Amino acid sequence: MVTTKTVWNHSMPNLRAHARLIRLEATSPMSGGILYFLGGYFVRFVRTLLLLSIWRAVFAQAGDGTASLDEVLRYTLVAAILWQQVDVQTTASVTFWEGTASSRFLRPLSVFGQYISETIGRWVPGLIFLSIPLALLSPVLGVDIMPTSSTTLFLFMVSLLIGILSGFAMDFILTGYIMVYLGNANYIASQIRAAFTMLLSGALIPLHLLPFGIGQALQWLPFATMASAPLSLYVGIAEDVGRMLLLQVSWCILLWLAAVYVWKKNRQRLVVLGG
């Protein structure tokens, strides 16, 4: 007879294993030296300052109202604070490139679960050394990032969680296809894919600012559900919150079904390519 205690006893070792993976990945970037470790965060910090300055210059030139400028500045800064969550990139493509991916298939843990745990672990240094400092410096930067209401904050957290789940699924889908069909060119293809994903998702430029109705069209694609949807909701520029959340959930389910299909169908090839 299966009891709650039995299920709990069986699940605890897996939870501990995933917790160890998170701790390991959270501390591993520090082994490369202080310059290597903090260099990337410094570049992102400077890029955020440049983006804020560029938007101020653009809106001053265009003569648009201050409300629109405030929305774009909030959008840009919140996107910079949550850069790892609105543009999910797992460790999958890196492990295939390094030839260490096959070990994930041999462990008594879910392959997806391992990559998710490793990715969450890699988020920790970014949160400590970039996200939190940016949030604390927001008053100095002249940007108010406080949520307009508790309801907005709650809906944003729900939307962000769905977006993160969709981001994991999308990364698994693209990594699977890139590895199977591009082989040794997977690293370059992964970098190009990351750039396009950032642009199409609205993580870099708010989609509603794109001309010729391009942004409106992109809002219906799965990429927009990862970044544009939660960020627009937080800033207060989302037009139909209910429809947006429904679209997010729909894409999230479809993406995960596709991710499971791609990796099951190509499991043997992925194991071989993984080293």
Image (cartoon, grey):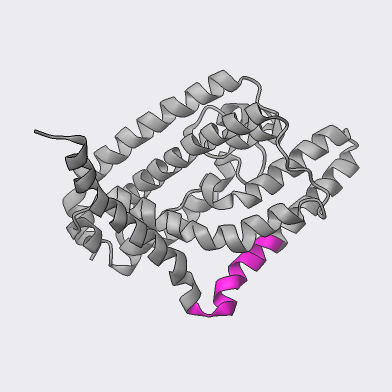
Task: Let me know if residue 35 is in the magenta part.
Answer: yes
Residue 123 appears in the picture as rendered: yes
Q: Which residue is drawn at 54% across and 45% down?
A: 86
Whole-percent x, y for residue 154 in the image: 59, 31
Whole-percent x, y for residue 41 in the image: 62, 65
Q: Is residue 26 left or right of residue 113?
A: right
Main secondary structure of the magenta stretch: helix
Q: Give the range drawn in magenta.
A: 32-45
Q: In this view, does 235 lie to the left or right of 85?
A: right
Whole-percent x, y for residue 253 in the image: 37, 30
57, above or below 118, in the image: above
Q: Quadrant of residue 18?
A: bottom left
Q: Residue at x 76, y 51 (%)?
A: 138
Residue 93 appears in the picture as rendered: no
Q: Which residue is drawn at 81% across and 34% down?
A: 68
* Image quarter hosting the C terminus: bottom left
Task: Let me know if residue 264 is in the magenta part.
Answer: no
Q: Which residue is drawn at 41% across and 63% down?
A: 23
Q: Is residue 151 left or right of residue 4?
A: right
Residue in the foreground of this view, choosing between 222 and 16: 16
Q: Quadrant of residue 144?
A: top right
Residue in the foreground of this view, choosing between 79 and 264: 79
* Image quarter hosting the N terminus: top left
- Residue furthest to the bottom: 33
